[in-house]
Image (cartoon, helix red, strand yellow):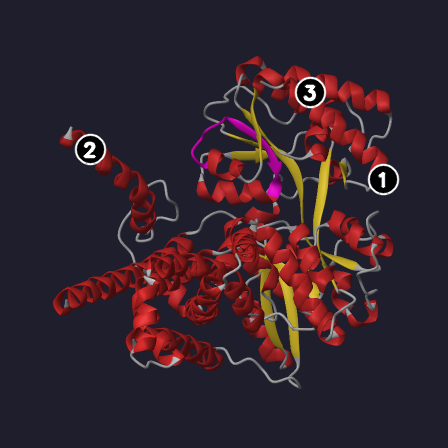
């Protein structure tokens, strides 16, 4: 029976032909070509900048995307592809440094480093920016629906405990984030290690129980877009994405402290094009490129020079660029060591168990 | 009773296809969201077609599916016939169980172990590794589709063919393969669909700039579903629809032909 076998062979042939053909749409350079493997979050760079970088330097960018820090780390660690520039979040930088996965940066090759605001340099997760440079930053705050929460002032964490919000608050499913709400409302540090303080925070969270509709992951976005709940404790970046979809929502970072997070640029040890990687970072930190990228991505930029080039309206938006005195209250989550982290997880779990 | 059965079926089909219809409908929405329909536009399709990177990824997805399904089917035919010919019951059973373990084991585990295997062997990740991985998880499905057809086959057919002087090759080519053809077809199309929608295994073995749609859409969806995703998904749905129609025509034509001969 020839027809079936020839059909299968035809399928293989057509497939191979397509694979061969795609090389001409987006030519993959030969081995000697100067290429740069970039591994970034999805939708996290203006594609025009990639084209511009290729034009300016003659380096071809091979761009791939990931959707979580953990998945990214596995792929970098296994080394099937030798990525040259990767964009981990700050806690992942600390982990990657601890596991000796990163190359120290040569600051001399990145003159545009001077554009980064001082508040965003020399953070505890990477003292002296030996391994990483900030790419975007943000906070944890409250996303809310102003119409249905009239009379509630979310500039205070304690507002979440208001009886009018019964069964109407969503929270991200993270031990540090949720415990952080309890700690901030009591005036403790986001990196509190005192057991009494942590227990108090957990008890206070238990009182929040009746107001909580759910502790969920990425579903928060979909739920808030259709107004499933009146308020949600989320990262500022996530809040921004949701607000694009649902313009009826507003966001604020309550006073009394909150988290400060970074997505950063690093060079893994396995990089093949270290010089190109430095060039790429320097390119992204350029004032104009940074501004263009910030407009496209929409998150808050640590690039002071780029910030000055943004629209007045964006720069004055205190929801995403908090006033300096409020910025002082923000804290990066420190790696508190496995023992302390398991305490946080334990208390978080205890709190979750009290929920119905 | 009959109307009840019919309406039940209608409800089930509506439930199955409503989400896809909804997605396709909003891929034509000029408003930015999936909540209100503002007007008709093709701009999301335009932005897909002007993004050469996305087009390459779309083509890659189809190419990987065709190549891996084709090769997996060829390997699967051999595997099924080999399994069928084993006389020792216990060996046959254990080999079959090993085959089935591959089908039920979680994709994440298959993906992670393939990633380790490829890096240990020094195979760089890219088109080759993705195709190999897809073949690996498709072969057991193909084997499972073909095996029942082989077991249906009366061994007297084979004896008769040999008695009439057919060589082993003739037996395979003129007796066995025609008999198991429906199984081969089903296996091929199953492999094709598995390859098109696999995310977990593929995620681990993509690299060197080679990517397929499932991985790309996952990364894009992290920042909310843009209508561009709707547009790509619609395109993929159309490809699958064409494949399904092709399958329908091939099988219905084959059965007509068979009916005509006997």
Determine if residue A255 is in view.
Answer: no
For the point 33% across and 53% down, which residue is it? B27
The span from disc 3 to disc 1 (Cα, nearest Å) is 23 Å
Same chain shared by disc 2 and disc 1: no
- B125 to A216, vertically: above or below: below
Residue at the image position 85 percent from the left and 20 percent from the top: A196
Percent from the top left, x then y, of residue B8?
Answer: 23, 33
Q: Which mark is residue A97?
A: none
Q: Label 1 marks which chain's residue?
A: A
Is residue A271 rendered magenta in the image? no
Residue stretch rendered in magenta on the structure: A225-236
Quarter of the image where the N terminus of chain B is located: top left
Which of discs 2 and 3 lies nearer the camera? The answer is 2
The quarter holding residue B150 reads bottom left
Task: Identify residue for label 1.
Answer: A337
Circles 3, 1 touching at the beta carbon (< 8 Å): no
Relative to A240, A155 lies left or right: right
Answer few, some or many: residues within 10 Å of disc 1's Cα (few below 14, many 20 plus, some between 14 and 19).
few
Q: Is residue A180 above or below residue B119?
A: above
Relative depth, front residue between B11 and A184: B11
Residue B179 placed where, x, y %? 30, 66
Mark 2 to mark 3 CA distance (whole Å): 51 Å
Asked whether the residues under the numbered discs 2 and 1 touch, taking CB atoms below 8 Å apart as contact, a structural biologist would say no
Specify whether residue A230 is painted magenta.
yes
């Amino acid at each position: 029976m020839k027809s079936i076998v020839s059909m299968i062979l035809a399928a293989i042939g057509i497939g191979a032909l397509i694979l061969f053909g795609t090389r001409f749409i987006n030519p993959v350079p030969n081995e000697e070509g100067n290429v740069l493997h970039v591994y970034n979050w999805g939708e996290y760079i203006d594609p025009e900048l990639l084209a511009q970088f290729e034009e300016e330097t003659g380096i071809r960018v091979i761009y791939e995307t990931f959707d979580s820090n953990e998945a990214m780390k596995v792929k970098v660690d296994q080394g099937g592809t030798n990525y040259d520039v990767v964009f981990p979040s700050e806690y992942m930088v600390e982990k990657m440094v601890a596991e000796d996965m990163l190359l120290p940066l040569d600051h001399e090759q990145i003159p545009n480093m001077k554009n980064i605001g001082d508040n965003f340099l020399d953070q505890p997760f990477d003292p002296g920016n030996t391994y990483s440079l900030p790419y975007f930053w943000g906070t944890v705050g409250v996303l809310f629906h102003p119409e249905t929460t009239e009379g509630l002032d979310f500039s205070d964490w304690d507002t979440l405990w208001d009886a009018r919000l019964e069964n109407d608050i969503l929270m991200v499913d993270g031990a540090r984030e949720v415990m952080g709400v309890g700690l901030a409302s009591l005036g403790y540090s986001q990196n509190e290690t005192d057991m009494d303080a942590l227990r108090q925070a957990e008890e206070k969270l238990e009182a929040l129980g009746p107001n909580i509709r759910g502790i969920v992951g990425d579903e928060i976005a979909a739920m808030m877009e259709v107004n499933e709940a009146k308020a949600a404790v989320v990262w500022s970046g996530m809040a921004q994405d949701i607000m694009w979809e649902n313009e009826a929502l507003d966001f604020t970072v309550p006073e009394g402290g909150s988290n400060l997070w970074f997505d950063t640029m690093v060079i893994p040890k396995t990089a093949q094009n270290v010089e190109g990687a430095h060039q790429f970072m320097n390119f992204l930190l350029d004032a104009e490129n940074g501004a263009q990228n910030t407009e496209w991505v929409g998150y808050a930029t640590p690039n002071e020079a780029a910030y000055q080039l943004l629209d007045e309206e964006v720069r004055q938006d205190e929801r995403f660029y908090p006033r300096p005195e409020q910025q002082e209250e923000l804290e990066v989550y420190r790696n508190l060591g496995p023992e302390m982290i398991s305490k946080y997880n334990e208390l978080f779990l205890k709190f979750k168990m009290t929920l119905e | 009773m009959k109307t009840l059965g019919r309406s039940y079926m209608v409800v089930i089909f509506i439930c199955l296809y409503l989400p896809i219809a909804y997605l396709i409908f909003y891929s034509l929405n000029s408003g930015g969201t999936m909540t209100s329909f503002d007007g008709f536009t093709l701009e999301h399709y335009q932005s897909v077609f002007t993004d050469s990177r996305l087009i390459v990824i779309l083509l890659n997805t189809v190419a990987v599916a065709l190549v891996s399904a084709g090769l997996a089917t060829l390997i699967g035919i051999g595997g099924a016939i080999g399994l069928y010919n084993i006389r020792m019951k216990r060996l046959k059973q254990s080999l079959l169980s090993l085959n089935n373990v591959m089908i039920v084991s979680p994709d994440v585990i298959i993906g992670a172990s393939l990633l380790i295997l490829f890096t240990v062997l020094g195979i760089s990740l890219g088109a080759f590794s993705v195709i190999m991985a897809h073949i690996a998880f498709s072969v057991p499905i193909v084997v499972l589709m073909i095996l029942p057809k082989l077991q249906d086959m009366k061994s007297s057919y084979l004896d008769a063919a040999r008695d009439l002087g057919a060589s082993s090759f003739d037996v395979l080519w003129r007796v066995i393969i025609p008999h198991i053809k429906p199984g081969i077809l089903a296996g091929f199309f199953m492999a094709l669909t598995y390859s098109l929608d696999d995310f977990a295994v593929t995620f681990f073995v993509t690299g060197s700039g080679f990517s397929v749609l499932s991985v790309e859409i996952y990364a894009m969806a992290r920042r909310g579903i843009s209508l561009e995703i709707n547009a790509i998904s619609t395109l993929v749905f159309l490809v699958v629809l064409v494949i399904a129609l092709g399958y329908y025509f091939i099988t219905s034509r084959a059965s007509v032909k068979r009916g005509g001969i006997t």
